[in-house]
Image (spheres, coloured by chain):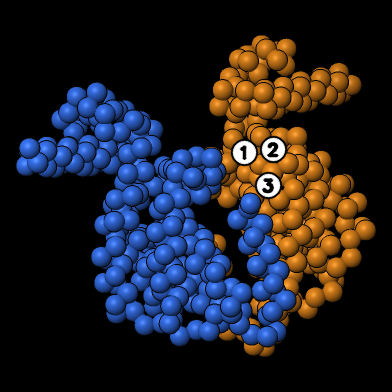
Chain colours: A orange, B blue
Amino acid sequence: MPSKSTSSSAKAEETGTRILEAALALFREVGFDAASMRDIAVKAQVATGAAYYYYPSKEAMVLDFYERSCVDMEPKLAEALEGAKGLEARLRAVLQVKLAHFGPNRSVLRALLRNGADPKYALSPFSTETKAIRDIDLDWYQKILLDCGIRIPKDLEAELPGVLWFFQMGVIFFWVIDDSAGQKRTAQLLELAVKSVVTLIKAAGLPLMRPLRKTALELIEVVKGE
Amino acid sequence: MPSKSTSSSAKAEETGTRILEAALALFREVGFDAASMRDIAVKAQVATGAAYYYYPSKEAMVLDFYERSCVDMEPKLAEALEGAKGLEARLRAVLQVKLAHFGPNRSVLRALLRNGADPKYALSPFSTETKAIRDIDLDWYQKILLDCGIRIPKDLEAELPGVLWFFQMGVIFFWVIDDSAGQKRTAQLLELAVKSVVTLIKAAGLPLMRPLRKTALELIEVVKGE
């Protein structure tokens, strides 16, 4: 009975989405720590057992939120990049899409900042659990470097998407803890940081910079590990 | 009765130290979160009320540990810097003294990494509560830049100690989460990162780098805020 199976899987997906949305709403209202699985289930109008069936933990919900965000941002990124010429504009576009997407849940991300720097913590951007998401981001950074109008030194090429990803995490981190009205300090930072990074990439191609580039590449190897 | 008062304040200080040492030992054994004030008091052989008299919270203990570390490291830093010629050697010396000093409590620092990136958290290196400690560090970085053999551009001079401090936090962070044997990855990172930073500072003085330096200085202003 394929039609029934399709409809029940559609229903399952709808329930999953409802639980996730209830969870995010509750995280925003009372904070990630204070929200219990039971309260999330009540808010989503499902039994607690059902909530656990969909998500073994609150952390699993956040991971799912991250993963869905990747999918949801795909068309937004593609659209923003269409009008963006050159690396500086592209980098700015990618970051602006991300901040806008995560905007409604900035307070949730702030709570998750805790442990975020520790790769052992599942929800850390550096963890094994978030590797798939990281890889999608890396693909985007690889894409915006293509024909970006800057000559990228050969030895830097493979590492640059990772460097830009790391840079992205820095900007997001600053934004998460930015208490200025409308996060206007982040807007200023974004403008200047993107400019600095692009100027640095340009400078990295200068013959004069070769020794520094070599050292920086060795450093990147150490940071990446294995 | 000055002699009595001196001896009782010496005793009070001894008790304070004993409580702090018991706390650090317990943090290492069971972790910062699991350690209770009551257990700390038992380990220090004082009443729980006495522990609270000395320290209102576990966070206050860690702050005191940070402050005492500053004092304790003073002669070690002075000694290490005596033999260190040039900025690269000086920077390496400062960082090596710090990592060696905090070595026995690396696991405690790892637990504190949680929230560490959030300036609102008292134990964060970016918090109001840790400003005095930050200022002592900044003084050291100012000191090692004096007659370091590199011409520092005038406009960068006032900001460079802060940049080096930020760099220090990056190295310490890497070390705290470094699970390699004997933290040998940190040793590699330290070598390469110090070299990169010093090369960058040298490059920053080149006329060619002036526009990037201007942008970077604006960026620093935004990050510092107010």
The reply to whether callout 3 and callout 2 are in contact (CB within 8 Å) is yes
Chain holding disc 1: A
Is the residue B183 above or below the residue B67 in the image? below
Q: Which percent across, then down, holds residue A156?
A: 67, 74
Q: Which percent across, then down, holds residue B87?
A: 44, 78
Extreme residue toward the bottom, this view: A207
Q: In 3D space, how far apart are the residues under numbered discs 2 and 1 (Cα atoms)?
A: 6 Å
Identity, as a three-letter code, of the amino acid under mark 2: Arg
- Asked whether residue A212 appears in the rendered view, the answer is no
Is the residue A219 above or below the residue B30 in the image? below
Q: Which residue is mark 2?
A: A106
The reply to whether callout 2 and callout 1 are in contact (CB within 8 Å) is yes
At 73% from the left edge and 41% from the top edge, which residue is drawn? A181
Q: Which residue is mark 3?
A: A175
Chain holding disc 3: A
Closer to us: A122 or A36: A36
Decide which of tag 1 and tag 3 comes sooner along the chain. 1
Say left or right for B11 vs B120.
Answer: left
Label total for image: 3
Local SS, label 2 = helix
At 78% from the left edge and 78% from the top edge, which residue is drawn? A151
At 43% from the left edge and 57% from the top edge, which residue is drawn? B135
Q: Which residue is mark 1?
A: A110
**Labels 1, 3: one chain:** yes
- Asked whether residue A73 appears in the rendered view, the answer is yes
Closer to us: B148 or A158: B148
